[in-house]
Image (spheres, rainbow, N blue to C red):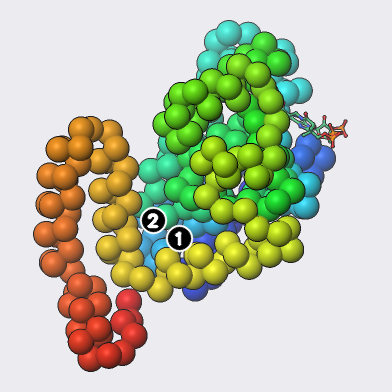
Amino acid sequence: MAVECVVENGIAKIIIDRPKALNALNSEVLQELKKAIAEIQTRTDIRVLLIQGGGEKSFVAGADIAQMSDLNPLEGSEFGRLGQEVFSSLSELPFPTIAVIQGFALGGGCEIALACDIRIASEKAKFGQPEVGLGIIPGFGGTQRLARLVGPGQAKKLIYSADIISAAQALAIGLVEQVVAPEQLNEAALKLAQMIAAKSPNAVRLAKIAINQGLEGSLEEGMRLEASIFGLCFASPEQKEGMTAFLEKRPAKF
Ligand code: CO8
């Protein structure tokens, strides 16, 4: 098994660990990832997911080039669809997801990070979409999600050039949200996960829906969506607890 999933105190952790290929994604790893995501999808006890690569060197070094090298067009498009399906199920998880990136996040590895809500990286991490150097294009959502996250100009620069950039450069263009020293990475990711996990899970999930669905339409539609979801919050006991706790000058318990 290359994909492990553990849940502790409401925080799920998926680890992709295939050391002999720097955690590259072959179809077996993608199937395992699909299964792990399906298993946590409906769990109401999970408040946040951390996803990371095993070992020190690599988050995920991309799709498995050895496996892809002999694919025919039909097999290529099936492989692409499998990756897209897995990464879409990751991006559609109802709770927040954080990619914890200690090393290479290349090709499909960068695309996993893009499918998460938040990315925290070590200063040693490296990012890129090297596909055009292999005669293919990013096929696990990269052409779409990268442009949406960093804007079309920066996405085109990265994708056309296949350049590998540092964590500092990734932070500068908005490809990651936080960069920390390598030895602080796990602690920083856990701290953020714990902060999220301590808040109203219902409100956090609703905020994710409002942001993600709102981005699909116009600002006006997004505002209407926000107003409806805002109203919905008042149907939850968590709103009562959050506000009562404030008025009683005590921490809220969710
Ligand atoms: N696939 C398969 N094997 C890999 C991959 C990979 N993506 N990356 C690394 N490996 C293997 C190497 O072949 C090597 O194996 P071995 O020891 O048996 O020779 C082992 O991992 C260690 O790698 P290196 O010796 O190369 O380690 P270095 O430190 O010298 O280099 C790099 C590290 C820079 C990360 C280098 O391994 C590299 O460039 N890897 C490939 C990165 C890449 O191009 N990734 C993008 C792949 S394409 C992709 O992700 C497309 C996604 C969409 C697909 C849609 C399909 C339709």
Seen at 13% across and 67% down, the residue is: 234
Residue identifier under label 1: 48
Q: Does 228 sit above or below residue 242?
A: above
Query: Which one is nearer the viewer's eye here, 100 or 222?
Result: 222
**Is residue 194 visible to us here?**
yes
- Mark 2 neighbour density, 10 Å: few (under 14) some (14–19) many (20 or more): many
- The answer to whether residue 39 of the structure is visible from this angle is no
| Vertical comparison of 121 with 173: above or below | below
The quarter of the picture where residue 242 lies is bottom left
**Labels 1 & 2 near each other (Cβ < 8 A):** yes
Residue 100 in the image: above or below residue 78: below
Q: Kindly identify the amino acid type of the residue bearing the numbered disc 2.
A: Phe
Residue 32, horizontal then vertical, whole percent: 59, 43
Q: On the rendered structure, is 42 left or right of 64?
A: left
Res 76 quadrant in image: top right
Residue lying at 36% horizontally and 63% vertically, measured from the top left? 44
- Queried on whether the Cβ of the residue with tag 2 lies below 8 angstroms from ligand 1, the answer reads no
Instruction: Please give left or right for residue 237 compared with residue 55 in the image.
Output: left
Left/right placement of residue 172 relative to residue 102 reads left
Q: Which mark is residue 95?
A: 2
> Where residue 166 sits: x, y (%)?
69, 40
The local secondary structure at tag 2 comes to loop
In the image, what residue occupies the spot 39% across and 60% down? 43
At mark 1, the secondary structure is strand
Residue sitting at 18 percent across and 63 percent down?
A: 233
